[in-house]
Amino acid sequence: MTDKELTEAGDNYIALEIKETSLSQEYHNRFKEILPPAKILRLYQAENQYKLQLLNELQNRKHRAVVTLCRDSFRQLTGKNSDSRF
């Protein structure tokens, strides 16, 4: 990528971050009108827990993919089944 494209990508990223923050602030203000503070914080905690769960699942999928790749590479290189006992 050229410097111009990289600068543009960075500017677009920051613009999206600003929009997301603005939207979060707007919803927070709406929540304050209808929910008690404890429920608002529980909502944010639930959202964060969900995000962490998704990240963990993605990480586990990536790990399983690497293990599968290594096992398949071993089989191709050795002609052996890695599940068999030596």
Image (cartoon, rainbow, N blue to C red):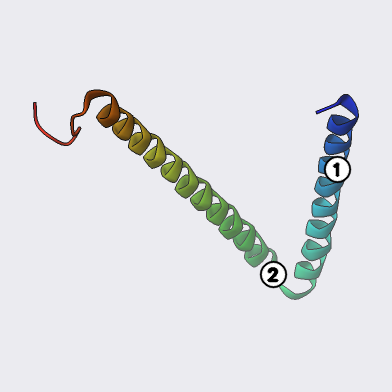
Q: Amino acid at mark 2?
A: Pro
Element at badge 1? helix
Q: Which of disc 2 and disc 1 is earlier in sequence?
A: 1
Which residue is painted at 67% across and 64% down in the image?
40
Q: Which residue is mark 2?
A: 36
Is residue 79 rendered to the left or right of residue 73?
left
Task: Report, in whole angstroms, how far the alpha carbon at label 1 lies from the one at label 2.
Answer: 35 Å
Q: Amino acid at mark 1?
A: Asn
Q: Position of residue 46 (x, y in %)?
A: 56, 59
Q: Is residue 51 above or below residue 34?
A: above
Q: Position of residue 82 (x, y in %)?
A: 20, 32
Q: Which residue is mark 1?
A: 12
- Of tags 1 and 2, the one toward the viewer is 1
Q: Residues within 10 Å of mark 2 (few under 14, many from 20)?
A: few
Residue found farthest to the left: 86
Which residue is painted at 64% across and 63% down in the image?
38
Which residue is painted at 60% across and 61% down in the image?
42
In the image, which disc is placed on residue 70? none
**Within the image, what quadrant is residue 11 found in?**
top right
For the C terminus, the quadrant is top left
Q: Residues within 10 Å of mark 1 (few under 14, many from 20)?
A: few
Q: Do labels 1 and 2 touch, CB within 8 Å?
A: no
